[in-house]
Amino acid sequence: MFAEDNDTKSRSLAYGVESMGSSCNISAFNFKNNHPNIITVNGADAEEYRQTQGRCTLNITVTDHFGLSNWTIVNITIIDENEYYPTIIPVDNVVTINDNTNVLSVILNVSATDSDLTEGQCLFFLHDSSGMFYIDELTGLVHLKQTVQNAEPKYNITVVVVDSGSPPLESNKTYIINVTDVNEKPQLDPISSPIYVQQFSSAGLFLFAAKATDPDRDVQNKNLTFSISQNGNLSIAIDPMSGNVSLTGEAKSSGNFTYQITVTDGGGLNDVMNVTVIVPNIKKETVNVTVLENSVGTIYKFSFTKVEQYTLEPSFDSSRCSIDNQVRNYLSFELLIQLKNLAL
Ligand SMILES: [Ca+2]
Ligand SMILES: [Ca+2]
Ligand SMILES: [Ca+2]
Ligand SMILES: [Ca+2]
């Protein structure tokens, strides 16, 4: 700037610079050495003038050697430089979600602040090697993209935030997504019921095995234990680990007995199923047969109309005599007692 004075030469004029009120940090503005009419700036910070959007006002005075002065106003606008990296929020980088979280749910709300004067709209991007999550570019909301039910317990995602400056600056932050396994109920496999047990069978006889599945990932949530209700007429027990069901006493009584099998997981959820055990009544029949020495072949034929199992008394020598339950003739069934080879 330049001032003229009709009384004297310009070099004898004294220039001064001051702030209008407190609008400018006057220490940053000075006249250049040996150039009293050039105002220099030294480190003006746009962020210092946030309330006035980077603007301040200087009052320039000029005084002659008689003490007469004049002044003019200079409005300064400081153009904001992009110098601050965006700050990502939240700072805590551990997020915990349940494994039954619905797909498309918001699992994390990322935002950013920027210390530059012109903050502008930050953009959000996601590096997700697992492909399980996505981020809204404008809002920073991180959504679940695929179900994590009973899947991996932990994922890492890196959020990248780019500010709106020129050139833009970016920050990134890695979040750990911990997935809590929510317990789901186990399910018993179908059991082919009823189960037939021969009357007078001994304790320890294996009857059937209960099987079950549990969808969970967590060891405790999928830890299965079997149990079975009791029936006073036929004692059976289930192995809590294997699900194997066996007699614990002789099957003395015939009849139909119903039991409830329960499988319970480590979280206390269960599934139940009823199983019927039938002990058919055994009828004994004595037949008198006369055979010739050295005979081989059928020696007696029973006829019956119900599907039943026939056995020979254990006292029969099974190497010489057998019973054939398979001969069937339409509505009736026949049973043959056969001699194998009496000559032996
Ligand atoms: Ca910035
Ligand atoms: Ca700045
Ligand atoms: Ca689960
Ligand atoms: Ca479970």
Image (spheres, rainbow, N blue to C red):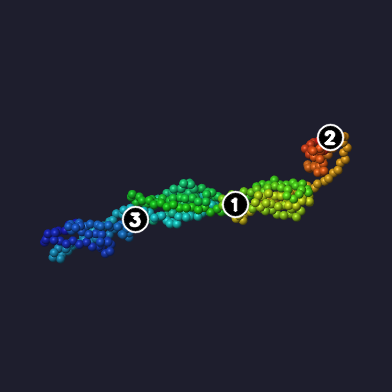
Q: Is mark 2 within 8 Å of ligand 4?
A: no
Q: Nearer the viewer, mark 2 or mark 1?
A: 2
Tell me, for residue 116, which label it has, or none: 3
Residue 260 in sight in this render: no
* 104 vs 267, nearest the viewer: 267
Closer to the chain start, of discs 2 and 1, is: 1
As drawn, 65 above or below 137: below
Q: Position of residue 54 (x, y in %)?
A: 30, 57
Pointer 3 local density, CA inside 10 Å: few below 14, some 14–19, many at least 20: many
What residue is pinned by disc 1? Answer: 222
Residue 180 in sight in this render: yes
- Give the image quadrant in which the ligand numbered 2 is located: bottom left
* 74 vs 187, nearest the viewer: 187
Q: Is mark 3 within 8 Å of ligand 2?
A: yes
Cα distance in 3D space between marks 3 and 2: 112 Å
Question: At label 1, which amino acid type do we have?
Answer: Lys
Cα distance in 3D space between marks 1 and 3: 53 Å
Q: Nearer the viewer, mark 1 or mark 3?
A: 1
Residue furthest to the bottom in view is 67
Question: At label 3, which amino acid type do we have?
Answer: Asp
Cα distance in 3D space between marks 2 and 1: 62 Å
* 225 vs 18, nearest the viewer: 225
Describe the element under mark 2 as helix, strand or loop: loop
Q: Position of residue 185 (x, y in %)?
A: 61, 52
As drawn, 288 above or below 277: above
Closer to the chain start, of discs 1 and 3, is: 3
Where's the C terminus, which quadrant? top right
What residue is pinned by disc 2? Answer: 343
Q: Is mark 1 within 8 Å of ligand 4?
A: yes
Describe the element under mark 3 as helix, strand or loop: loop
Pointer 1 local density, CA inside 10 Å: few below 14, some 14–19, many at least 20: many
Pointer 2 local density, CA inside 10 Å: few below 14, some 14–19, many at least 20: few
